[in-house]
Amino acid sequence: MTDAPIPTNTRCGFVALLGAPNAGKSTLMNALVGAKLSIVSPKVQTTRTRVTGIIIEDGSQLIFVDTPGIFEPRRRLDRAMVRAAWDGAADADQVVLLVDASHRSLDADSERIITALKEAGRSVILVLNKIDLVKREVLLAKAQALNEMFAFTDTFMISATTGSGVADLRTHLAQRMPEGPWHYPEDEMTDMPLRLLAAEITREKLFVSLYQEVPYSLTVETESWEEFDNGAVKISQTIFIQRDSQKAIIIGKGGQAIRKIREEAQIELQEMLERQVHLFLFVKVREGWIDDPDRFKPWGLQWDA
């Protein structure tokens, strides 16, 4: 069997997804690509790095960059995340600003983003998300008010969760990409290393299961990845926390919490990798990791942002 020929008149470009924390960027990214690449949880600011998702649409290769939420930074990690988001926008052929339409009024973070985009002179597509939670007349009023604040090139109304309007947005973006060869093979869906993607899946399960208790400042690292002749893979990961008192939250009574997290992460990893996965989780205290330059490198973040 030979590979399908690549179309001659191809387009290719980068699309940056910008927005305030919990605007739904990661959910939209997953919906656009049709696969789970970005972690989604009720906890804000869970995306720490620029996650790249790749699709082919009508001869165009769209390279989506799910950036960390842009907010008022208070710590070194916050500053690095916000810097990564703006870097992603600067390099993009198209910028999409995602706004949570279910909020009664525009949040301060979105206002700051619009002001910065104005100053940068960028062309921006407005996407109002979570329209399934808002009445039509309210949506129209929000869209009008936002377009009075900024001259958006286009406005889309979607629900990233239900998928409503996502296909129209994807088609529109494909038509806006510049002509040129594809940057990635046709079957590639992300340039994110598997070890990092696996760690992100476990981190998501931690936030979803323990989001009211788990410290935001934990991180997960894939320490080893061992493949076997029968196709199975053994993955060992360490959950790093800042204080010894946080261990009990992660492990749970009789180890129930970490057992549940391991099982859920293992199932998702098996579905993603399409092979048997043996996942092992360890919890360690690493005080001050959040200010350690070596911890920023795997996420592609600048420690001195």
Image (tube, grey):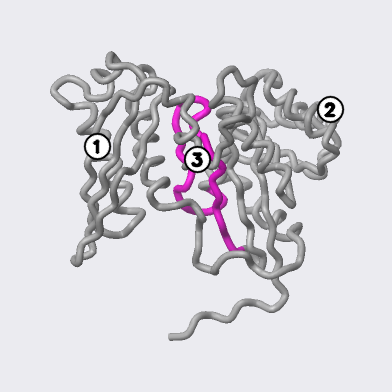
Residue at 76% in and 32% down: 143
Which segment did they paint magenta?
A: 31-56
Q: Does residue 280 appear left or right of residue 102 in this picture? A: left
Label ID, residue 149: 2
305 or 64, nearer to the observer: 305
Horizontal and vertical percent for residue 29?
56, 46
Q: Amino acid at mark 2?
A: Met
Residue contact between numbered discs 3 and 2, judged by CB atoms under 8 Å? no
Callout in the foreground (3, 2): 3
195 relative to 202, above or below: below
126 relative to 78, above or below: below
| Quadrant for the N terminus in the image | bottom left
Residue at 78% in and 30% down: 116
> Which residue lies most toward the left here?
254
Q: Earlier in the sequence, mark 3 or mark 2?
A: 2
> Which residue lies most toward the top here?
245
Horizontal and vertical percent for residue 15?
67, 50
Where disc 2 sits, the SS reads helix
How would you classify the magenta stretch by its main secondary structure?
A: loop
Residue under label 3: 297
| Quadrant for the C terminus in the image | top right
Question: Residue 141 sits in which quadrant?
Answer: top right
Label ID, residue 281: 1
Residue contact between numbered discs 2 and 1, judged by CB atoms under 8 Å? no
